[in-house]
Amino acid sequence: MPDRDPRLTPLRAVMASGSLDAVALVPGANFRRLLGRDFHQNERPLVLVVPAEGPPAAVVPNLEMASFSTLDFRGAIFDWRDENGFEHAFRALGGALGGLGAAGARIGVEAQRMRVFEATALQAAFPAAQLVDAHAAISSIRLRKAPEEVALLRQAIRISEAALEATLTQVRAGMTETEVAGVLMRELFDHGADGLAFEPIVAAGDNSAQPHARPRFDYRIRPGDALLFDFGASYQGYNADITRTFFVADASEKDRAFYDTVLAANEAGRAASRAGRSAHDVDDAVQRLLEASPFAAFARHKTGHGLGLDVHEAPQIMRGNAAVLESGMVFTVEPGLYRLGECGVRIEDDVLVTETGIDCLTTFPRELRILGGP
C-alpha cells in the first residue's frame, strides 16, 4: 500500500508548518475538500487520522462502510457496529498508528467541528499525545478555490438568483414571511438546487432589523415594509450566500436614504477587495463609510466572511484581521444597517479575488426596487 496519497499533500503541508505529527478529521468541509465526499455527522463517530508520514487510518461505523469504500481510501479502516460500541475500533487505530503514542506527539484537530466524545475517544487511543486546536490551519486548505470549485459556486449563485427573481414576481402585500419563504424554497429546488445553504431569512418590516431573523407565520407584509432576503442554494456541496432588500409598494425618503447608504458601503467594500489588500482593509473601507453617514449608530456587524463548502469560513472580513487577500479566495461583502423596531437593509455579494481585482460572482441588481402592492 503506498504511503502517499496526493490528495493529502495540502494537509501534510499544514502539518509541516505547524509542527504537527498528525491531523484528525471528522465529517465536514475539510474532509470533503480532501476526499471528495462528506458524511452525515451523527451519534456514530467517524474519524480519519492522517500522520505526517505513512498511510492514514480511519474509524468508520459499519453502517457507512459501503459509502466509505467509494473514496479510494489508501489506509487501514477499523469499522464498528452499534451493538459493540466504538471503543475497540479506536484502540485498533491507536495500535495501527503506534508512532503517535509517543509522549510529545501533537495531533491537530478541528476544534470547531470535533465533538467532545470524539476527542475523548481519540485521546484514549493516543494517551501520551497532545490534541492541538489546528482548526484554522487545517481549514486553510480551502482558502484558495480551484477553478472547478469556482464553477460550482457560480452555478449555486445562478440558481439562487433565478429563484429570487421568480419569487419576487409572486410577492404581494398581505402575504406572510413564511409564505414567501416557502415560495423561495420551492423556486430554489425547481431551478436546480440540491440543497439549501442554510434556512432562508425572509424578514419584513421591523423583523428586517434583526440580522438573523426567522420568518414569521403571523405577520402579514404591509405596504412600505422593507423585505429582506438572505439565502442561498447549495449545489454539489458548494454554497451561495446572497442578500437583497426590497420595499413593498413604496419606500419613505428616510428608508431610501438608509438603503442608499448601504449600497454605497457595498460598493466601497467591493472596490477595496483585491489581491494584496488585507481583510482589515476591506472592512475598514466599509465601516468608515458607514461611520461617516447619518446612520452610523445602526451598523452592527463586520463586512463579510469566506464562502465555499461552508457558508461561513475563512477569511473573516473584519477590522483587525491582517490576513492578506490572495487570488482564488471567495468571500462575501455584506454591509447592513438596522433600525431596531423599524427597518433593516443588507446588500450581500459573493466575490472572487483575481490577479487583477475581483470577479463579482453575484449579478442580481442592487438598485432599490419596489415590489408590487396588493
Image (spheres, helix red, strand yellow):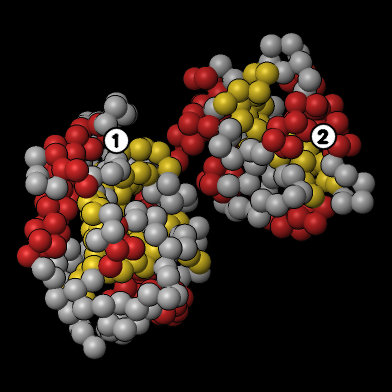
Q: Residue at x 66, y 23 (%)?
A: 131
Q: Report the residue that reaches farthest toward the front.
A: 341
Left or right for 5, reference 168: right
Other residues around mark 2 within 10 Å, as few (<14) / some (14–19) / many (≥20): many
Element type at mark 2: helix
Q: Residue at x 45, y 75 (%)?
A: 217
Q: Residue at x 31, y 84 (%)?
A: 174
Q: Which residue is mark 1?
A: 318
Q: Find residue 251 and report its image quarter.
A: bottom left
> Looking at the picture, how far across and down is residue 325, in whole percent?
28, 35
Q: Judge by depth and name the residue closer to the eye, 29 or 185.
A: 185
Q: Is residue 1 visible?
A: no
Q: Find residue 108 and report its image quarter.
A: top right
Q: Is residue 124 above or below residue 360?
A: above
Q: What amino acid does circle 1 point to?
A: Met
Q: Judge by depth and name the residue closer to the eye, 362 or 220.
A: 220
Q: Which residue is mark 2?
A: 90
Q: Find residue 306 and report its image quarter.
A: top left
